[in-house]
Image (spheres, helix red, strand yellow):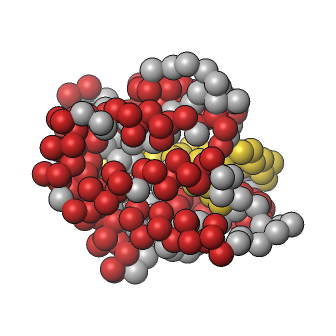
Amino acid sequence: MTATLSENIRQFYDASSLLWEGVWGEHMHHGFYGLEGKRTTERRQAQIDLIEELLQWGQVQEAQQILDVGCGIGGSTLYLAEKFQASVTGITLSPVQAGRATERAEEANLPATFKVADALHMPFDDESFDLVWTLESGEHMPEKPKFLQECYRVLKPGGTLLMATWCHRSIEAKPLEPQEQALLNKIYKVYHLPYIVSLPEYAAIATQLPLKNVRTTDWSDAVAPFWGEVIRSSLNPKVIWGILKAGWGTLQGALAMRYMSQGYRRGIVRFGLLCGTKE
């Protein structure tokens, strides 16, 4: 990961993560509102539902050594540790996130370790984990093949890679139009994303690793209501003041939520899932 991109991501999450926790809770990812996106669910419960639905879709019934790539402040990491009574490790570029996640693990008395590390150069031995879990972090990676290769490298034989990530619509039949790319560029700039790819492109990379039993699915409809919920929850003086105090980058991120909402409505931004096993 380039030094500039890495530093921008670090600064963004260092500045915004504690605000997010204070206002929206420990889970820094989408919620699940039923496959058609019509289920009425309180936002925090929807985020927990997303974790459970991902595990069910990925057919993950047990795990002992889990790696959470892009762990945030440990929301899903600690959830998995408790659910599976497993040893978990989370990595993030943000020292603020790693520090807060460590505090939360100690408070919950859960066997979790958090490190500041680059997902393209993970500080782990080959074949260290039986579940590599990456929830909305692939979009930050400047080298998608290298990212999946690292996930594959640290995965034990028989282990599962389970990923959910922001994608753009498939371009197999029709390339992105200029106005579609313009909207994506606005999202890239604010959230410090080098680029995103389509779900079929991720599947092609995974197959070449070679992961076996590669499956993908699109849950864009299931998660699309999330951005509207976040926008509505931010429209109160306490949240607005917190965003302003957190700095310009956080304010830009808050204002850019409308771009994500537009992206889902127009079918440009997609929420893609991928899983596969290592022989």
Dividing the picture into quadrants, the one containing residue 234 is top left
In the image, 206 versus 112, the foreground residue is: 206
User: Is residue 143 something one can see in this rendering?
Assistant: yes
The answer to whether residue 130 is left or right of residue 109 is right
Residue at horizontal 35 percent and vertical 54 percent from the top? 255
User: Is residue 18 something one can see in this rendering?
Assistant: no
In the image, 32 versus 130, the foreground residue is: 32
In the image, 241 versus 93, the foreground residue is: 241
Q: Residue 93 at x, y = what percent? A: 33, 62
Residue at horizontal 18 percent and vertical 36 percent from the top? 237
The answer to whether residue 168 is left or right of residue 27 is right
Q: Identify the residue at the far right of this view.
A: 173
Q: Residue 224 at x, y = what percent? A: 58, 39
Residue at horizontal 44 percent and vertical 27 percent from the top? 43
Q: Residue 159 at x, y = what percent? A: 64, 45
The answer to whether residue 192 is left or right of residue 225 is left
Q: How many marks?
A: 0
Q: Residue 241 at x, y = what percent? A: 15, 43
Residue at horizontal 55 percent and vertical 35 percent from the top? 225
Residue 90 in the image: above or below residue 80: below
Quarter of the image containing the N terminus?
bottom left
